[in-house]
Image (tube, rainbow, N blue to C red):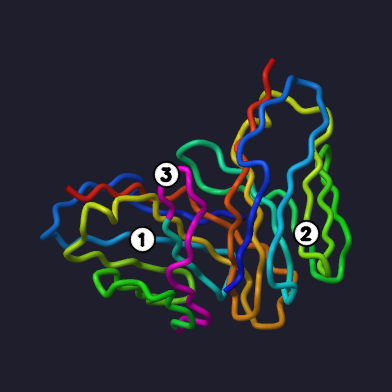
Amino acid sequence: KQEVTQIPAALSVPEGENLVLNCSFTDSAIYNLQWFRQDPGKGLTSLLLIQSSQREQTSGRLNASLDKSSGRSTLYIAASQPGDSATYLCAVRRGGNQFYFGTGTSLTVIP
Amino acid sequence: DTEVTQTPKHLVMGMTNKKSLKCEQHMGHRAMYWYKQKAKKPPELMFVYSYEKLSINESVPSRFSPECPNSSLLNLHLHALQPEDSALYLCASSRGGLASSGNTIYFGEGSWLTVV
């Protein structure tokens, strides 16, 4: 079964700092990888989707990379803001519409 | 419209009750999902429907019974639940199709379930 791990589990940074969140997965046979944010008590909001053939995707201050062969993805957040405080989850998609989530990183951006 | 709507937002039920959670999307998606999420844990996949047929059941206890009446609706029927079933239940949808590698999965806001 696919195991998806995120490091660190929690991160606290001052406003304006650039930061990197990590996601690793054990089975490289994936269709795509998706990054989400989840605010407390809320559903998940999709941030970026990287297809298995792609190396990276960018949206605004967010940049996600994928190295399928090594089973790793990173989410880079530039110039962090207090509004970025949330839990960030990566999810990998295998065949048959199976999406498996990582353990999550809880981010706090201090004003 | 990229919205997945879940009702109710909050549900409290006794262990002998029968209740249902509902989910609706109008994006033309043909894959729909139920996930369970406990506090400070990632979502865990429960069921996947593909083209209105159950394609994945992640060994979920039979006290949870999914139903997909049509391509826009997904229900989760609940019966004889235990207090440890209390959690946030998330519905999601995606375009579907085995070769659709570019599918984004969209989530609803979830239904908070408390079993007393």
Where the N terminus of chain A falls, by quadrant?
A: bottom right
Mark 3 lies on a secondary structure that is: loop
Judge depth for marks 2 and 1 and give the one in front: 2
Q: Quadrant of residue B70?
A: bottom left
Location of mark 3 (residue): B39
A22 displayed left or right of A57? left
Mark 2 lies on a secondary structure that is: strand
> Which amino acid, by three-letter code, is at mark 2?
Arg
Judge depth for marks 3 and 1 and give the one in front: 3
Which residues are the magenta region?
B37-53
Q: Are marks 3 and 1 on the same chain?
A: yes
Contact, CB < 8 Å: mark 3 with mark 1? no
Of the numbered discs 3 and 1, the one sitting upstream in the chain is: 1
- Mark 2 and mark 1: span between their CA atoms? 35 Å
Residue at 24% in and 70% down = B63
Q: Are marks 2 and 1 on the same chain?
A: no
Q: Chain of mark 1?
A: B
Numbered badge on residue B22: 1
Location of mark 2 (residue): A72
Q: Tell whether position B57 is magenta.
A: no
Q: Quadrant of residue B84?
A: bottom left
Residue at 52% in and 52% down = B42
Judge depth for marks 2 and 3 and give the one in front: 2
